[in-house]
Image (spheres, grey):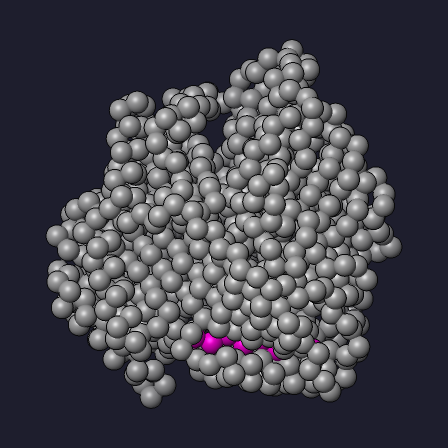
Amino acid sequence: MSMTLDTSLQGAAERALGAMRAQGFDAAMASACRKQLDELNAEQNAPSLLRSTRSQRLSLVGLIDGRKAATEVSGWDDDEALRAAVAALWNDALAAPADEANAVSAGQHARIEQGPPEGDLGLLAAKVAELLAFRAEATPGFVLKEGLASHSVTHTHTLTSAGSDLASRVGAYSLVAMGSAREGTASSSFNYAGGDTHALGALPAHEHFGIGAFMRDTLRQVKTRPLAANFVGDVVLTPAATASLLQWLQAQIGDERLIAGASLFRERVGEPVASPLVTLRSRFDAPGVAAVSADGFVAAPVTVLQDGVLRTLTPSLYASRRAGVRHVPTAAAGWSLEAGATPLAEVIAAVPRGALVDRLSMGQPAPNGDFSALLKNSFAIDGGQVGDALGGVMMAGNMARMLHDVLAVSHERIDTGALVLPWLRIGGLHFS
Amino acid sequence: MSTHYAESRQHELRKTRIVMIDGHVASNTSTVDAGLSARVREGGYWGFAALPSSASAADAHELALRNARAMARFGPRDDSLALPGGAYRGTHEFAGAPALGARENLERLSALQAHCRARYPALKSLRLVAQEEQHRKQIANSLGADTLASIRRAMLHVFMTVEDAAGAPVELMDSFTCKGGFGDLDLSLAALSPALDSLHEHLQAKRDAVPVRGGAHTVVMAPRLAGMLAHEAMGHPCEADIVLSGAVTGDLVGKRVASDLITMVDYAHSAGGGEAMMPVFADDEGTPARDAVLIERGVLREFMSSRETAARLGIAATGSARAYGPGDEPLVRMRNTGIVPGTSRYEDMIAGVDDGYLLVATSNGQADSTTEFMFGINMAYEIKNGKRGRAVRQTTLSGSAIEVLKSVDAVSDDDVWSSAGYCGKKQTMVVSMGGPAIRARAHLGGE
């Protein structure tokens, strides 16, 4: 398997690390990365563009007397340019205040190879053609604003002065569809679905990532109605909307809030912060993901919520040392909310009054969790029945409260690669 | 098959980002992303290729051409579309103040940190995020365009956090932006103190915020919200690719979509008697850029376009095709979008509201093909009997852009611009937005 790792990157990282040692850095990290992308696009219901990009990046982190700086440049072949980048980094680091929390990864080792290393242009074209054919036959009122099928492969080699040595080759296919439905002069809201997979050919295009279902639902969203009156009720969040809740939770247990002492969950590890129905685990081997952290650590599997109990925070090395909490490396993506025992139909049938919500269109929720969102691509639920599409309806609540108020988790989930998420029924939301 | 069009772009994107949290430097990073790209239109299809700077332009062109030809597998396509727009030749680089080194930048942030800590001792946390960004592009195409242009912006975001009576964090942010680099950004206390005092005052009020009454209300949007209204409400629905994808605006040219107090323009390179914050003299297709008057005294006039979308709609190209990074293809994007100032006084607009809300600060927003838009409101107050009342909790403003803009009954004589954020649409993009205070009816999320 190691045959497919790009060994030239190790040489680039070694040369950069050598240049940083020669400059005088106490500690250093060098990461060489090469990426290749082939992306076939459709626009306004027709194939339009084939885009290929080849890029390379050298990322350097240097520490001197506890002072730290980082840089990225687009290449490494030119020795003169490398020396200039290292010299500029040296000046930037010397200018920074000393901070005992600064350190580089030590003793980490990984060799990761996953996903298809080579893209198949014929497969990309076939999937775009399937998407267009599905639109024309099953959802002719849907306008595919953008559709794309792509393959990318990213090779990375990271070395640190403290002996870490991490190499990865991650290949993945992606498929995305985005658009709206049109009927006469009326239009639905835009919506989209997509994700990453190792096996693009395993399913018809519309069966990946809920694409076909969202295109069909969009047709029913051209005609919408507002609410007759404000009420407090239940919401059923689709996996796409559940992602918004997850994003807020992850910010609360991540670097900036922990360093600033402004996290609601900083002191809550070991306590219930969500409904016992909620379990959140990593899946750092997801398509398109390498199980290493941005600061050069192997990202081991981690459970964040177990039956609603917060098991860990997720700070980087710097944030853990600065905030005085346990270091838990995480990859750039890859999370899974455990499936529940209730079929989706029963989750919806149990809602006396509320909404089935696919998109929470909103600004950033407040750090204390307060939010209000415009409901997009959503339907009313009355007496357990999904009714008309909603227009001009807003929902207000608190994200922290919503985690506690999860009443049901669906058995069905959608796997988009980076996320595997179920539908959630949550009570006590204000609709207006 | 014939090659109808080819373009090449050398593109360098430089960024510096410093994050200081309570005096600790959490990020001190400078990056350079450089490369060259080519785009070719042949047989009615596009091919694009982006390669590292060390590659040759010929290699990029060859790969782009191969990609366009590979699209022929989808069958013949109408190849007769003539791409409109002229061919710009010229150089536009903003010089600005001399660049500052890391030491000066960090010293300035440390001084600001110390000032805030001394002046606002109850702060739980203070986060400073400083960023400068330079886009430098050399573009040539088969129509004879040859341009070299740079766009530079610098910004500082100041996040203040306190605790409410229950110990929960309450946060508020303000942004300071300028054209140019850090050297052009005035971070002197004389310049920032009033705004920092105001930010802190709002934050203290937000500690005791009450819920918004959800529903339709009369709202006064402070001048710094007008740009967001312009960008989200009618900016995106007036992008020609969105129009081609079924946006309702496609049927509304020449029709009333706003109060006659509203004139909305996407400025290309000059506004208010000077160069705009994001000056685009030629876009990334080498098209000479011109202003797009989206709404003129309440009537929808035109759309922003690339060469291809202009051809498909049968309109003149506005020079709005822009690519964010070296590996990105040009898309229809806004440049400097704003509402033209009116004649009302901001204070009078508030005084004229018996029961409504004053919206002071916003976060991100979203647009839609339906023209139903939203943006987050981080700071707002009740208005009772013409006076500012209690602060209200985080809310969201939404509505049909057409209905909201038709309800506008006052536009202030202010003209406040910012280039703090990114616009997202497949790629991110640097844009600026601005205008006056607006009074209208709109929906606020709440209880």
Q: Foreground residue, B184 or B60? A: B184
The residue positioned 27% from the left and 34% from the top of the image is B111
The residue positioned 76% from the left and 59% from the top of the image is B316
Q: Which image quarter is the C terminus of chain A in?
A: top right
Horizontally, is B180 left or right of B390 in the view? left
**Position in image of residue B314 (x %, y %):** 81, 62
Judge whether residue B247 can be spotted in this image.
Answer: yes
**Magenta span contains residue A109:** no
The residue positioned 60% from the left and 32% from the top of the image is B415
Q: Foreground residue, A123 or A71? A: A71
Which image quarter: residue B199? top left
Residue A373 vertical placement versus B50 (above, below): above
**Position in image of residue B374 (x %, y %):** 63, 41
Residue B106 vertical placement versus B172 (above, below): below
**Magenta span contains residue B48:** yes
Residue B60 vertical placement versus A161 (above, below): below
The residue positioned 47% from the left and 51% from the top of the image is B94
> Start and end of the magenta stretch?
B45-52
**Position in image of residue B202 (x %, y %):** 46, 23
Horizontally, is B126 left or right of B434 in the view? left
Which image quarter: residue A286? bottom left
Judge whether residue A330 can be spotted in this image.
Answer: no
**Position in image of residue B22 (x %, y %):** 27, 37
